[in-house]
Image (spheres, rainbow, N blue to C red):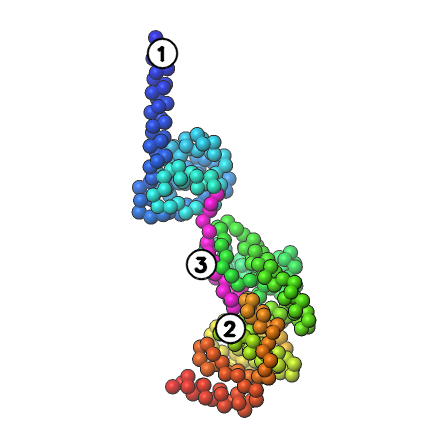
Amino acid sequence: MRLRLVAGLVLIALTSGSVWLVWRTNGSAAALAAAARVVEIPAHAGILSIAASLGRAEVIESPTGFVLLSLTRGSARRLQAGEYEVERGATMLEVLRLLESGRVKRHTVLHPEGASVAELARALEAARLASAADVLRLAREPAFLRSLSVEAPSLEGYLFPDTYQFVRGLTPEEMLTRMVQRLRAKLGPDLVARATARGLSVHQLLTLASIIEREAVARDEMRLVSAVFWNRLKLDMPLQADPTVQYAVGRERRALSRADLLTDHPYNTYRRVGLPPGPIASPGLPAIEAALDPAPVKYLYFVAMNDRRHYFSTTVEQHNAAVARYRLARER
């Protein structure tokens, strides 16, 4: 009789526990009723630590219930670390399934055409994915450049402009490596062969394309801008490209002074003939194509008419007249 009573009490306790666990499983934390929440699970954390973290983040109401549920599902030892975005109204079971799946939050980082390594570094820091200082240091680190087979003083120009999805926890090395690999995939053997046929190494191709990228706002002008630079290179004329001077003096996209143009620097194409030592930004495929296929024109000069278009000239007299005309128009 006594054994039956004990067995009955145990059965009631188990049934009550199951009912409680089911109730907890199907309910959501009060904080999730208002909005989604982001929680970060550190690497090598045990189930008790994970449950406590979820409780502090208010994405579950019962850490004990979470532990019991994970033990019941046999997943307590295989929950994955990372940053998770828990959807609004998610139940405890859905939170557990999220950690079981490893579907960590992805951060979208845009590296646009014409952006520099410095601009990328600031974007990664703004997304809290890496410090700008670490990215800038790594982009110039000789050992890292050798590991990527990049024969250049930095990764400038070798990071393909695109929209990337990065997860928190990736190292700067992993993110930059992915961007270099994307460039190599986009270049392909055909573009490399075309560059060789024009007497350009990949480094020289990216250098010229980066200047075209920063000079031409409208894509349909890229081949014209390319033609001006090719014509100047053939005549040993300085390229006189403002973006290279901006890069040299660290003014990025700001207006240049007369003193800037006189700066003695390898990237100052007003004072040095030929291509600068390396790219000044990340060129996109249209700029790379334009560098390999300049328009069949004899232009040697261009001046901005407005924020998007340029006026192209063959002689210095035509160019000076255009400069005076459009400068006067801008000052009105």
Report how far apart the C-alphas of labels 1 and 3 lie in the structure.
65 Å
Q: Which amino acid, mark 1? A: Arg
Report how far apart the C-alphas of labels 2 and 3 lie in the structure.
29 Å
Out of 193 and 171, give the one closest to the viewer: 193
Residue 294 placed where, x, y %? 59, 76
Examine the structure image and report whether residue 232 is included in the region drawn in magenta.
Answer: no
Instruction: Identify the secondary structure beneath mark 3.
Output: helix
Q: Which residue is mark 1?
A: 4
For label 3, the crowd category at 10 Å Cα-Cα, with few meaning under 14, some 14 to 19 and many 20 or more, is: few
| Numbered range of the magenta stretch | 102-122
For label 2, the crowd category at 10 Å Cα-Cα, with few meaning under 14, some 14 to 19 and many 20 or more, is: some
Residue 134 placed where, x, y %? 53, 57
Q: Which residue is mark 3?
A: 126
Horizontal side of residue 6 vs 245, given as left or right: left
Q: Which mark is residue 29?
A: none
Mark closest to the chain's N terminus, 1 or 3:
1
Q: Which residue is mark 2?
A: 219
What's the residue at 56%, 56% (across, down)? 178
| Quadrant of image for the C terminus | bottom left
